[in-house]
Amino acid sequence: MSDLVRGMARPGAPGPPSPAPAPPPAAPREDAPAPPPAPAAPESRLRIGPLTEPTPAPAPAPTPDVDAAQEAEDLFAQLHGFIARARELTRGAEPFPWVALGGHVDRVVASLDAGGALFWEAHRPVLPPGVDWVSYHQARVAVLALRVAVAAGYDRARLGALGLAGCLFDIGLWQLPDGLLRHHDALSGEELAQYRAHPRQGAQIVRRWGPPQDGLVEAIQQHHEREQGQGFPQGAAGAGIHPDAKLLGLLDTYASMTLPASGAPGVPPHEAVRELVRSKNDFPPALVKALLGELSVFPPGTMVRLNTGETGCVVAVNRNHPLRPRVEVYDAKGPRQGAPKIVDLSEAPFLYITGPVSESAR
């Protein structure tokens, strides 16, 4: 061992005195109070409670470089793909994978909580080639309904059941003869009776699967009932209709108007919204108001004309000012090359929408 390690002075001329060693750190007092625990993160208003069976872990949070629109498109494709595969289960006695569907609903809710990309992906009234309309329609309604449900005051305990019902509410349509939906507006008396039986048929299938949430079967069976008793299959009215059935019925109507099962051109979103506002006796005003808060009178995707004569496309709504959304302003030939010109009408007092652009004027 060296002299330095031993702390001994070497022989010869004495050097400067060594500095005194630093005192050891004081031991913590046993009676010192423990630091307070970190505050819990605030609970999201959209998270849903667990199903009666454990659900898969939610997808990891996206990194900042992930394209939100692409992520929403992928998530929506996974959802309607899962629903499409459930069609085979309606024909046999296999158990339904409620845990897997609950996982999809969890991921939908998490995405809606993070931003609006999934909502507008579901809102887009375009059926991809080769995709089953019933599956796609149910996925659209489920996503739209979950978003509107929060505005309507749903708490987290109710969102899970609503999401499950929204994914399965129209499975009774798979029991109808092939092609019947293609001419839905011109059904014979016998075909109309078959169509009006689909809510009961869907409810019977879901009951057989043993749903994990109360009210699921009732919501599916009643989604065509209306406030004044003018719906089917039972003619229930008012408080006799399950709240989830009312919300699903509203979004089912809106989604069917903008993307019909027949394959015919859909009603423009702003016209569908106005039609729902006019149908005062069909749905509770509070639900229609909640839908309006999400879609506005001019929903995203609506072509509009400004008071300057310019045209553009609505890209985002303003909940506080429904008539003053954000608009991508076009030039005479359509969308501008390069960076788009986005105008927030709530910050442009001298600009306003004079009305939608008709299909013939585009």
Image (cartoon, helix red, strand yellow):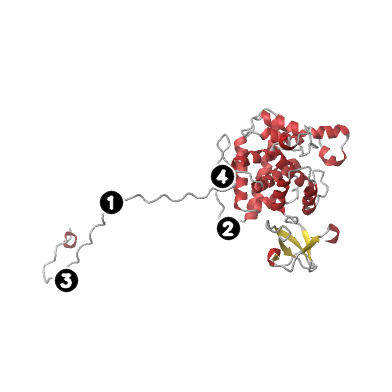
Alpha-carbon span between mark 4 and mark 2: 19 Å
Q: Which residue is the extreme one toward the left? A: 12
Residue position marked by numbered label 1 in the rendering: 29
Residue type marked 4:
Pro
Element class at badge 4: loop
- In percent of width and height, residue 45 lies at 58, 48
Residue type marked 3:
Pro
Mark 1 Cα-neighbour bin, 10 Å: few <14, some 14–19, many ≥20: few
The disc, 4 or 3, on the residue closer to the chain's N-terminal end is 3
Residue 65: which numbered mark, if any?
A: 2
Q: Quadrant of residue 345?
A: bottom right
Element class at badge 1: loop
- In percent of width and height, residue 352 lies at 75, 65
- In percent of width and height, residue 304 lies at 78, 61
Q: Are marks 4 and 3 in contact (CB under 8 Å)?
A: no
The disc, 1 or 2, on the residue closer to the chain's N-terminal end is 1
The residue positioned 29% from the left and 49% from the top of the image is: 31
Element class at badge 2: loop
Mark 4 Cα-neighbour bin, 10 Å: few <14, some 14–19, many ≥20: few
Residue 58: which numbered mark, if any?
A: 4
Whether 104 is drawn above or below 196: the answer is below
Residue type marked 1:
Arg
